[in-house]
Image (cartoon, rainbow, N blue to C red):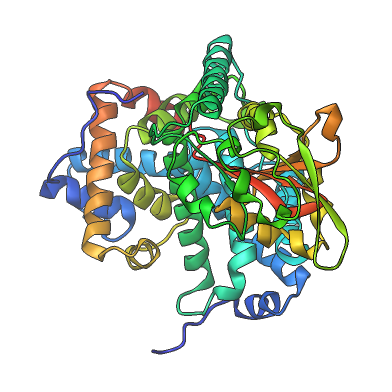
Amino acid sequence: MASIHDPDEELVSAAQNGNKEALEALLKNHYEKIWGICRRIMQNESDALDATQESLITIATRIEKFKGNSKFSTWVYRVTTNTCLDELRKKSRRPLLNFDSEETDQPSINQVESSVVDKLFIEEVLNQLPAEFKTVLILRDVCDLDYAEISETLDIPIGTVRSRISRGRVAINNYLANGNQFDNWKGQTK
Amino acid sequence: MKDPNFFIPENVDEFEELAISIAEGDVAMPKDASRELIEKVEEFTSVKNQLSEIDLPSNSIRDAQIQVAVSVATDKVVVPLRRKTLFSSKTSGAIAAAVILFLVIGGALTATWDTSKTSDDLVVAPLSSSSDSSLEEKSSSLSSATDNGDSFPDMASEEPASNTGESAFAEPESASLTADGSIQYAIDLSLYQEEAIELFLLEEFLRSEINELNGNQPCSLEFIQTILGEPIISSAWLSNANISNQILVFFGNQNLVLVNANNCENNFLISGITP
């Protein structure tokens, strides 16, 4: 197999050899995407913070096992996605912990900057999607991965990725259109 | 809340597929594109843009989270994740209290009567690395340590606290001589399961004690994690005055293990605590 050019290669190598600064730099470089995945998959900021922390720890503790068969970022997204989905599954098995979950949240991060549209629509709509559809859309839109990278990250065929993205987008659009919310939406996002 | 009006289409028609491809940047917008197509692309693009716009946590939160991860990986420090308090409402508090009551009553009943009831939800079993009986005990639901006076074979030279279902009234601590001649005190940890479960459910315990056992090889975190059967999330000392700073409890997501800090072979696993 041809070696994959990975911009993280040197840092990964150093981190695998116990270099703390390298590990820290790697986590910092990928934090935004890790957070993005967690924020979109989890249903509130508090859970997203937990999932982000869990993901960072998993990445940091398992980096020695990363063999370089894919780009480091792909591995990071895979670990993060799996961690978030695991967290969701745990939460679904612990219904009591969902009580008043929003009430116990910390004050919203940068809440002032969060648009009403974002809060009211995108999260609500995204949470309507089954996890397998939500995940591909998040990796596409938040992490800006192409179909092949999503396929590799989730270990599913490219055709499935493409189909889920299309069906997920249409589902969201139909839902918003039927609720006559697009005018409002587009008005705020233009 | 799932909206019954939300549905995933089985198929996507060609027009929508084209609009999505344009929004994705895979295909250029045709020069003679219809107004309908342009609007459709705008809709998809709006949603796409909204999905990608995410407020980041502050730099201090980001840095703190990264430091935690780096510390866990390089210093083997186990730092607990922040978990929400269970009792965020009266309702959840009441339900949790009922669960605790149920567990306590269940434990008391099985301590009094040696039964073979089964339960998929809760398994309470004392665990000793050298105990043959522990596996059998695991399969018996709500079995308490009172059924297992023989589960601490290290105490063979001493009278077991009890093996007849009376340990709830027995002296909670007994001593035994080890091979090197030192005295190790074994505590009947089952007596403290109620307090531990309460802590597990409350999730309002101190978490810094997780490092107390670092450097103590027989009681390494790996050892505890092996017993726990899942990653350690946090730990706490049991606050009971009689055993202050003697019993540590380690929490996973669904299991907890009580450990005698002076004798780590003396431990007690409670698994499957999922209300």
The x and y percentages for residue B62 are 70, 48
B207 lies above or below A80: above
- Foreground of the two, B253 or A46: B253
Asked whether, in this view, residue A45 is left or right of residue B167, the answer is left
The x and y percentages for residue A14 are 70, 79
Asked whether, in this view, residue B28 is left or right of residue A94, the answer is left
Asked whether, in this view, residue B114 is left or right of residue B85, the answer is left
- Foreground of the two, A82 or B264: B264
B179 lies above or below A90: below
Q: How many marks?
A: 0
Q: Residue at x 80, y 62 (%)?
A: B178
Residue farthest toward the right in the current orientation of the protein: B182
Residue farthest toward the bottom in the current orientation of the protein: A2
The x and y percentages for residue B22 are 27, 53
- Foreground of the two, B86 or B275: B275
Q: Which quadrant holds the N terminus of chain B?
A: top left
Q: Quadrant of residue B118?
A: top left
Q: Residue at x 55, y 28 (%)?
A: B111
Can residue B270 be seen by looking at this rendering? Answer: yes
Q: Residue at x 83, y 63 (%)?
A: B215
B224 lies above or below A75: above
The x and y percentages for residue B217 are 78, 65
Q: Residue at x 23, y 23 (%)?
A: B4
Can residue B33 be seen by looking at this rendering? Answer: no
